[in-house]
Amino acid sequence: MSTPASPQASPQASPPDLDQPLRLHPLTYLDEGEEVTVGRADIDSYGLFPPDGAALLRRLEAGEPPRAAGGWYSEQYGEQVDMAEFIEVLVELELLVKEGEEVVERTGPVRWQRLGRAVFSPVAWVLYGLLVAAAAVAVIHTPALMPRYQNVFFTHSSLVALMLGIAVGQVPWILMHEAAHALAGRRLGLNSSLSVKRRFYYVVFETALDGLVSVPRRQRYLPMLAGMILDVVVFSGLTLGAAALHGASGAAGLIGRLLLCMAFVVVMRIAWQFYFFLRTDLYFLATTVLGCNDLQATARLVLRNRLMRVLRRPGDMADESTWRERDHQVARWYSWLMVAGYGFLTFILFTTAFPSGVRVTEMAIHKLNNNFSALNAADVFTFLVLNFFEPVLAAYLAVRAWRSRDRTPRTTGTTAPTA
């Protein structure tokens, strides 16, 4: 029989007793035709099993000893199964109850589940629609509210104030974006976690919803798109706030321009989601629609094999027989899009990002030379720190990931995707 796509299991200290029933944690099963997703919802550990493997696992979960279950499998499917190897896979996925471990079953809804249902209730959707419609009317009535890059320069008095409006002012909306993902998952009873990750030279927040693989495919779309939906709502709210302050002077006018600045950056973050090769929200949506499991990893291996063929090094090629057929089919053309995408971002890095970094540094130094004072020096120093914090952090995360990869033994197979 075929084995589920999972990390390679390490040898056990002692062989399992095949005549004694196994203790398994409460498992969830999602049958998707050619594959069955099985796992633990409490720790979000899942594996892909063939239907016959899932049937065998169900018998083990029901209390049948492994040897007897293996005999049933041979009679049912006409093939022998290595039960010791099968058990190793269960151990690797942490589906078996360890000695001395207590089984804790979830009771009641997950935290924030009711809030998630309220945020995505029919009444809430009506309110979101009215907000977006009102913002559209305001932009049509006052074209100056249209998102433009000039809105970024909402003040010329302080470099720090400018940088705070562009970068730090986005933090609340970014967190709300991730919270929308989490709440959309929580309404389905799924756990979630927030982490800081790197996408090429971008630093991003990421909400992990590993449990999405355990729910029907049609229920996964909203948790994946919830962040972008929230961005549209935030943009609408900021635009309406700027409309209320349009034409005002003094502090009110400054706040109005700041709102337009933040609204423009929100639009840029929506556009960033189309860089799907950076594993954005739209990437996960596309892989779900296409029926892929780990398209990005398979595409990288496809590219590696192409390179090894050119270099005439077949011994260094990845074993294509371990790949899921659907991932392999899509990766044949997706890999070229991924190369084009990374090539485009590299072009932008050298033609825009680096020159922009040099330009803002020259601008800061020029301001300091024209009027050297303690206040100006603090303004310039803080501006430079804020401006270069993200690329420095991205470089740090890249180095740490590289060192971690060098220390981690290589494994085979694929794991369930995150959202």
Image: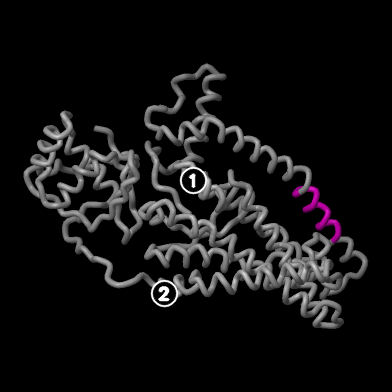
Q: Which residues are magenta?
A: 353-363
Q: Look at mark 2 in the image and give the residue it sits on.
A: 114
Q: Look at mark 1 in the image and give the residue it sits on.
A: 289
Q: Amino acid at mark 2?
A: Arg
State whether residue 22 is above or below residue 113.
Answer: above
On residue 110, which mark appears?
Answer: none
Q: Marks 1 and 2: in contact by CB < 8 Å?
A: no
Q: Position of residue 45 (x, y in %)?
A: 33, 53
Q: CA distance from mark 2 to mark 1?
A: 28 Å
Q: Which secondary structure is most common in the magenta stretch?
A: helix
Quadrant in the picture for residue 252: bottom right
| Residue at the image point whose x is 86% and y is 78% from the top | 247
Residue 142 part of the magenta-drawn span: no
In the image, 417 versus 147, the foreground residue is: 147
| Residue at the image point whose x is 46% and y is 24% from the top | 316
For the question of whether residue 160 can be seen, the reply is no
Residue 357 part of the magenta-drawn span: yes
- Circle 2: is it few (<14), some (14-19), or many (20+) Cα within 10 Å? some
- Circle 1: is it few (<14), some (14-19), or many (20+) Cα within 10 Å? few
Residue that protrudes farthest toward the left in the picture: 19
In the image, 162 versus 27, the foreground residue is: 27
| Residue at the image point whose x is 40% and y is 35% from the top | 324
For the question of whether residue 257 can be seen, the reply is yes
Q: Position of residue 190 (x, y in %)?
A: 39, 62
Dot 1 lies on which element? helix
Residue that protrudes farthest toward the top in the picture: 312
Q: For the N terminus, which image quadrant?
A: top left
Q: Amino acid at mark 1?
A: Val
Disc 2 or 1, which lies upstream in sequence? 2
In the image, 56 versus 297, the foreground residue is: 56
Q: How many marks?
A: 2
Q: Is residue 358 left or right of residue 292?
A: right
